Image (spheres, helix red, strand yellow):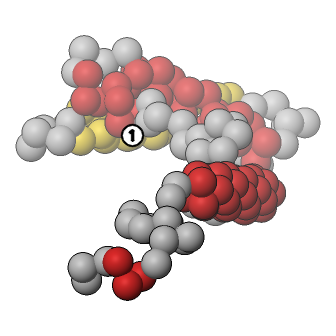
């Protein structure tokens, strides 16, 4: 069997999130030569139809439809580069970098606390220990 004509029809609906939707449809037909690969032509037609449909929806007057067709890119919380679909909030390498940074920050915080504690201890040691009689005075003179 020899294929001489290929037709592709693609339809895409996008919800506006308000009980409505918008639809775009593209129908493309191509006459092919006997020397052309029909599957390759089919792939090219489908790609062209997809580009047309998505372009129509991106140009929608409805803001919610445009946002649905152009979702915000998911970015790594550490390096701000795009994430793959399989990644959660950060790249695996970025997660290791974040853990190292947090460990370093925690160590710095503990060191600051230790130095502040030592400084407070030195200040407390400078204060008089007891209020009362001098050491050379006799305890018997005290009324208590």
The answer to which image quadrant residue 86 occupies is bottom right
Whether residue 115 is situated above or below residue 143 in the rendered picture: above
Whether residue 45 is situated above or below residue 124 in the rendered picture: above
Answer with left or right where residue 31 lies relative to residue 89: right
Q: Which is nearer the eye, 15 or 129?
A: 129
| Residue 70 in sight here | yes
Q: Which quadrant of the figure contains the N terminus?
A: bottom right
Relative image position of residue 121 (x, y in whole percent): 60, 61
Relative image position of residue 112 (x, y in whole percent): 67, 52
The answer to which image quadrant residue 38 occupies is top right
Whether residue 143 is situated above or below residue 124 in the rendered picture: below
Q: Secondary structure at mark 1?
A: strand
Q: Residues within 10 Å of mark 1 (few under 14, many from 20)?
A: few
Q: Which is nearer the eye, 104 or 136?
A: 136
| Residue, disc 1 | 11
Q: Which is nearer the eye, 85 or 51?
A: 85
Whether residue 8 is situated above or below residue 1 in the rendered picture: above
| Residue 1 in sight here | no
Answer with left or right where residue 48 lies relative to residue 108: left
Q: Which quadrant of the figure contains the C terminus?
A: bottom left
Relative image position of residue 109 (x, y in whole percent): 64, 55
């Amino acid at each position: 069997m020899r294929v001489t004509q290929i037709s592709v029809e693609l339809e895409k609906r996008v919800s506006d999130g308000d009980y409505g939707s918008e639809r775009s449809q593209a129908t493309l037909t191509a006459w092919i030569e006997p020397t052309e690969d029909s599957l390759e032509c089919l792939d090219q037609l489908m790609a062209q139809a997809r580009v047309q449909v998505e372009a129509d929806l991106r140009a929608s007057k409805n803001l919610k439809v445009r946002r649905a067709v152009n979702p915000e890119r998911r970015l790594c919380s550490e390096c701000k580069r795009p994430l793959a679909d399989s990644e959660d909030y950060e790249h695996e390498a970025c997660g290791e970098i974040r853990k190292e940074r947090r460990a370093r920050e925690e160590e710095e915080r503990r060191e600051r606390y230790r130095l502040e504690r030592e400084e407070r201890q030195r200040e407390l040691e400078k204060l008089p220990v007891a209020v009362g009689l001098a050491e050379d005075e006799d305890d018997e003179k005290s009324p208590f």
